[in-house]
Amino acid sequence: MTTFRGVNSLAEENYLKALFNLAGESGVVNVNELSRHLNIKMPTVTSMMKKLSAKNLVHYESYKPLKLTEEGEKRAAAIIRKHRLTEMFLVEKMGFGWEQVHDIAEQIEHIQSPLFFEKMDELLGFPKFDPHGSPIPDKDGKINWKEFHKLSDCKPGEEVILGAVINNSSEFLQFLNSRDLRLGLSISILSVESFDKTMVVHYENHPAETLSHTVCERLLVDKQ
Amino acid sequence: MTTFRGVNSLAEENYLKALFNLAGESGVVNVNELSRHLNIKMPTVTSMMKKLSAKNLVHYESYKPLKLTEEGEKRAAAIIRKHRLTEMFLVEKMGFGWEQVHDIAEQIEHIQSPLFFEKMDELLGFPKFDPHGSPIPDKDGKINWKEFHKLSDCKPGEEVILGAVINNSSEFLQFLNSRDLRLGLSISILSVESFDKTMVVHYENHPAETLSHTVCERLLVDKQ
DNA sequence: AATATTTGTTAGATATATCTAACTTTATAA
DNA sequence: TTATAAAGTTAGATATATCTAACAAATATT
């Protein structure tokens, strides 16, 4: 039984998603980067890029950086939409913690059933962000980019709202849990250590919590 | 990225499940049967049986019928447990109709996350049957077989409760929907046509509904 | 019992997705 | 600006899961 996988194989979907996630401003990604991110050797990546290029999902030219085509970007956004809707569903409707949902969503994002995800979307009330504050692409693949700042770029005296986290690893999220740090929280910056950029912040029942630069770089905030 | 699939590949899981589902009283299945059911050619089936035999999941000897080993049966039951829990979740918690859930569950049954299915189980209140009345294997793979009778084996005058349906195809379930036939319904048998075994039954707001033998064979009932 | 049909196996081919080893191109640094 | 390092490609091997064609065994039919 050839399990139905829609137009793209599971492997292809993972490459598309990775290309989408790794693309910065320029939208381009190196073979090496992609290789490291997917933990797949470079020759394998090269051959897959040729395949996706033949399907008009990736712009590929020897020795040049990779870029998704418009169609490739649409497909990738659709997968990320499914991933983020799933994360939201797991947290909001099934009682998972935000640190538990990544690996499950990583599998469910490949489910082929528009109806299944439409139902999720509906039950969730058409959310715009996932539990980590990442925007959920709409059905056309468009993403509502919110302009967040890194907490590490803020100055003492500023009061900000925690809007998103950059790293979704279970370890990082568990660290945030242990400090009662969650999205929506109002945080005041008390001081910044010029030596190592460590911040002392105040929020809720935490009058003076010390956060390393590494942590502050991964917290995205809204300066209102 | 080698997508994590636990101990068995997706293909292997589908063979195990099919062996489980096709095994009747004797617990044995023919290569040909399996081949037809999975829509995979016999030589492919033979080679997979050798592989599963090497993994001690199937008893395989040339030209003899196939049988799951104890371990194979456990693995198969675990997959079927995930399938049926999913169907129940889709119907009870996501608002799907019983005719819509098979194909989605067919995909979600392969998700590797014990926690995900434990959560489903818990949210559903540890159900014993799926939306089609099929028993949900417990965590040890044990199945609580209820002794149902085919409606087609019942006699005029009997009053029975619809407990399960044998065919889960969307078409059949839609037919049942169109006649307001659902699990739990109390049905009285008014008459049986000796010529073609067609039954005339009475239930709820249907004073005299005529059901073909083909349909009655697929309806399992409880004679209380 | 001989023959025909069905069922099952063997052998070898194909497609996908991966790898390693060797080589080439591009980028970096002395 | 040449040498070195990093990034990328080519060629060929491997594993999985599938197929077709040809053959063998078991079962059914006359």
Image: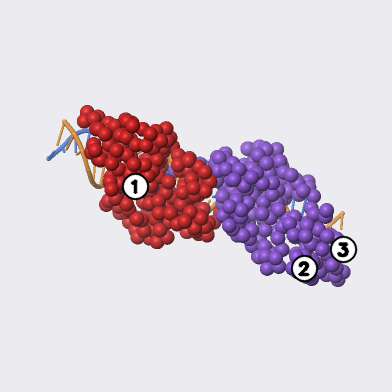
Chain colours: A red, B purple, C orange, D blue
Whole-percent x and y of residue A182?
A: 40, 40
The residue at the point 55 percent across, 43 percent down is B116
**Depth check: B127 or C23 in front?**
B127
Question: CA separation, marks 3 and 2?
Answer: 16 Å
**Depth check: A203 or B191 in front?**
A203
Query: Local crowd at mark 1 within 10 Å, few (<14), some, or many (≥20)?
Result: some
Between disc 3 and disc 2, the foreground one is 3
The residue pinned by badge 3 equals: B157
Whole-percent x and y of residue D21?
A: 61, 58
**Is the residue under label 1 in contact with that under label 3 (CB below 8 Å)?**
no
Q: Quadrant of residue A3?
A: bottom right
Callout 2 amino acid: Leu
Whole-percent x and y of residue B156?
A: 87, 64
Query: Local crowd at mark 2 within 10 Å, few (<14), some, or many (≥20)?
Result: some
The residue pinned by badge 1 equals: A22
Q: The residue marked by circle 2 belongs to what chain?
A: B
Whole-percent x and y of residue A196?
A: 25, 29
Tell me if I can see residue B111 in this picture.
yes
The residue pinned by badge 2 equals: B211
